[in-house]
Structure formats: structure tokens, C-alpha cells
Image (spheres, rainbow, N blue to C red):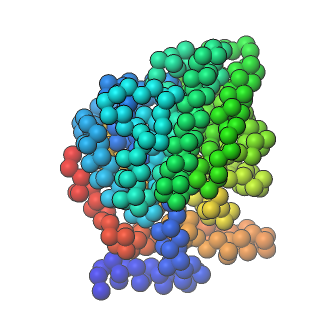
Amino acid sequence: MSRIEQNYRAAKELYADLGVNTDEALEILRNTPVSVHCWQIDDLTGFENPNAVLSGGIAAFGNAPGKPKSKSEFIQNLDQALNLIPGKNKLALHAVYLENNGKKVERNEIRPEHFTGWVEYAKKRNIGLDFNPTYFSHPMAESGFTLASRDEGVRGFWIEHGKRCREIGAYFGKELGQVCVTNHWIGDGYKDHTIDKVSPRLRLKDSLDKIFEKPISREFCVDSVESKLFGLGSESYVPGSHEFYTNYVMTHQNCILCMDAGHFHPTETVSSKISSYLAFDQELMLHVSRPVRWDSDHVVMLDDETKAIMEEIVRCHALDRVHIGLDFFDASINRIAATVIGARNAKKALLLALLQPTEELVRAELEDDFTKRLALSEEMKMMPFGLVWDMFCEQEGKPTEDWLTRIQY
Ligand SMILES: C[C@H](O)[C@H](O)[C@@H](O)C(=O)CO
Ligand SMILES: [Mn+2]
């Protein structure tokens, strides 16, 4: 018996003493998809234009060597990352990762045929795809407004982009037999003190209505709308706020809310919001990220908020209603390793949640035994979950703690 198996047996017994079935936890973990975003690999440069500069309220800071210089290098690096992430994964793409074969394809002209290579890639890896329209890093977004723009031409351009992206999402879903979450985020907003805050919101609402007008089967594509408090250059006012999109999804059946861990006031947490949406039967998309003082998109750590997010999903029995996606881009460390660290941490947090004696904790709460609730919650922190994680990696044929040695950097 290997050392990992021996350790797992010991851990399994300890967890069983507390009523936790580690085999069941591993089975759920193995089958819960985490959507790994492709854009940590190249700082969101994409293939549309190799000289593209990221703009529109987000930025990747750092100059670590190893940024891919070609599409083939990008794929090699992505492969390296995906090969080191155990369990079921999806891959999240942005529209700028289209294959245009050197020809200019405008954002309002993209079609499924520009993504056939990605479908082949996903089929080969047996993974699903998620999608994101790219409403930024483009001259038509230079005014700081896209879907909420006063300019009919600008709005029309981006509405068409949104519509086409939904078709691409549906194409992914049909081809891969797995729903594609098509997530719409815009960087619209004002840097300073804003007088008329309602008109841009009314225009955004109207643009979204037009984008989502055509019914698309939810079996193939589910659209999500991602809120944000502020961005670089939109510090004072963002029309696509949390309240705006909460109201939008409550009154429009054809899309769901996406919450990004970095898009709220510094003391607000996504984990504390999840159950409120579930109470109203809402399906959710999450962007698991790590804000450091602002929406800094640091690599996800196994920190308290990431653990709390996964606990909420598990405790609310909502693994089938909450889509877990990642969103970070740190150019100051090796980009392949960054992708792996963040994805593995999200999965470790999910495993920790699955290894909790949830029923026992709920029982203590129902019996008003708050002493036991706290004591047991705290004791769980001392349990050897790392030994269960190692077993997961072994079962999945992935390296345990020495995965970094597999990356050349
Ligand atoms: C690249 C992503 O679409 C983007 O990060 C968005 O999801 C976001 O979080 C913007 O702050
Ligand atoms: Mn996000």
C-alpha cells in the first residue's frame, strides 16, 4: 500500500468518527466542475490582435517571464496548467481568443466558426466550455461606455457582439453536451462625481433586453450578468452595479447573476450573499477571485472567504445551482503556476466544505446547542484534510504537493 493510501485510511477513520464519509466527499469533488479561465495564461491578450493592450477598467500588473508569444505557446502552457488540476474542469474563454487565421474579424462579426478549434480542444480533453463576450480592450470602448453608451452606434456594435456571443455559447453547449455559461461583463462607468445615474442604467437595461431577446435553450447556453462596484477609471459610478443586476435577473427569466469576489465593498463578501439568491430559486455564476484592498484579481488562496464560499454552496445543497468559475490574472508570477495554484485552492476549499459534518452542525443549531456548533466547527480545522486531498490527486493521476516541479519556468 502506498504512503498516500495508508495516510488516507487513517484520515478516513478519523473523519468517519465524526460521521463524515470521505469516499463520498471525493466522489462529489471529482464530479463538480470548476471553470478554469484561460486568461491568466497570457494576461488577457488573446488572439484577436497579438499587440493588444488590456484596457476598459481592468489591468494585469507584473512582468514575469514566460508570457506566450504565439497561439501554440499559449496552448502548450494551458495544457500544462490543465494537466495539473485534478477533477472535473471546464475552460472559460473570452471572445478575443477567437481564431481569425490572420484576418481581421470585428467583434460584431464573430461566429461559431471562429471557435471550432476550441471545440476540438475541449472534446479532446473531455471538458466543457464557458464563454465571455469581450466588451473591452477595443476602440469602440474608449469612451468608457459600451452597452450603456449614449451613442447609438456604439451601443448597437456591442449589442451585436453580445448576441453573437450567445450563439457561440449555444454552439459550445450543443457540441459538447454540457451547458455553456456565457458571462456578460462591461466596464462602463464614470471616473468622477456623476449627476444622472439613471439614464445609463436605462440604456443598459434596454441593451440587455435586446441581447437576450432571442430565446436560446438553457440546455446549451445560460447567460449571466456580472456586477461590479467600480473599476479603474470608473471609480465613482458603474451602471452595472450589484443592485442593478439583482433587479435585472429577478425580472428577467433568461439570465442569471454572476458575483465576482472582487466586485464589492472591501468588507462585503460574496459568501454571505449566496443563500439570499438561492432562497429565491436563483441559479448563480461565481467568479472566485482574491481582491487585495481592491479588485486586484490576485491568485485565489485557500483563505477564509474562498472556504466560506464553498461552505455556503455545500451547506445550501446548491452544487447544481451555483456555477463555480475562476477569475484572476497576476502577471508578476509564473502564469501557468498561477492558474494551477488558484484552481487547486478553489478545489481544496470545496473539499474542506465537503468534509464537514454538516448534518451534525445543523442538528446542534436546531437544538440551540450553540456551544457544540462552535466547538465542532473549530475542531474541524484540525482534521487532516490534506491526506484526503493527496488521495484525490493520486486517484486522478495528478501530482500532490510537488506539482511545481512539472512546470519549466
Ligand atoms: C476578464 C473577465 O471577464 C473580467 O475579469 C471580469 O469578469 C471582471 O471581473 C472585471 O473586473
Ligand atoms: Mn469577474
Comparing 309 with 124, the one in front is 124
The residue most toward the front is 113
Q: Residue at x 52, y 43 (%)?
A: 168
Quadrant assignment, res 359: bottom right
Q: Residue at x 47, y 81 (%)?
A: 12
**Is 377 located above or below residue 74 in the figure?**
below
Q: Residue at x 26, y 36 (%)?
A: 70
Q: Position of residue 95 (x, y in %)?
A: 46, 36
Instruction: Mark yes or no: residue 272 visible.
Output: no
Q: How many marks?
A: 0
Q: Position of residue 243 (x, y in %)?
A: 73, 35
Comparing 362 with 68, the one in front is 68
Instruction: Mark yes or no: residue 73 visible.
Output: yes
Q: Is residue 62 left or right of residue 211?
A: left
Quarter holding the N terminus is bottom left
Q: Position of residue 82 (x, y in %)?
A: 35, 55
**Is 224 located above or below residue 303 in the figure?**
above
Quadrant assignment, res 146: top right
Q: Position of residue 197 (x, y in %)?
A: 73, 19
Q: Residue at x 59, y 35 (%)?
A: 163
Quadrant assignment, res 89: bottom left
**Is 42 located above or below residue 389 in the figure?**
above
Q: Is residue 100 left or right of residue 229?
A: left
Comparing 218 with 198, the one in front is 218
Q: Is residue 106 left or right of residue 254?
A: left
**Is 361 located above or below residue 10 in the figure?**
above
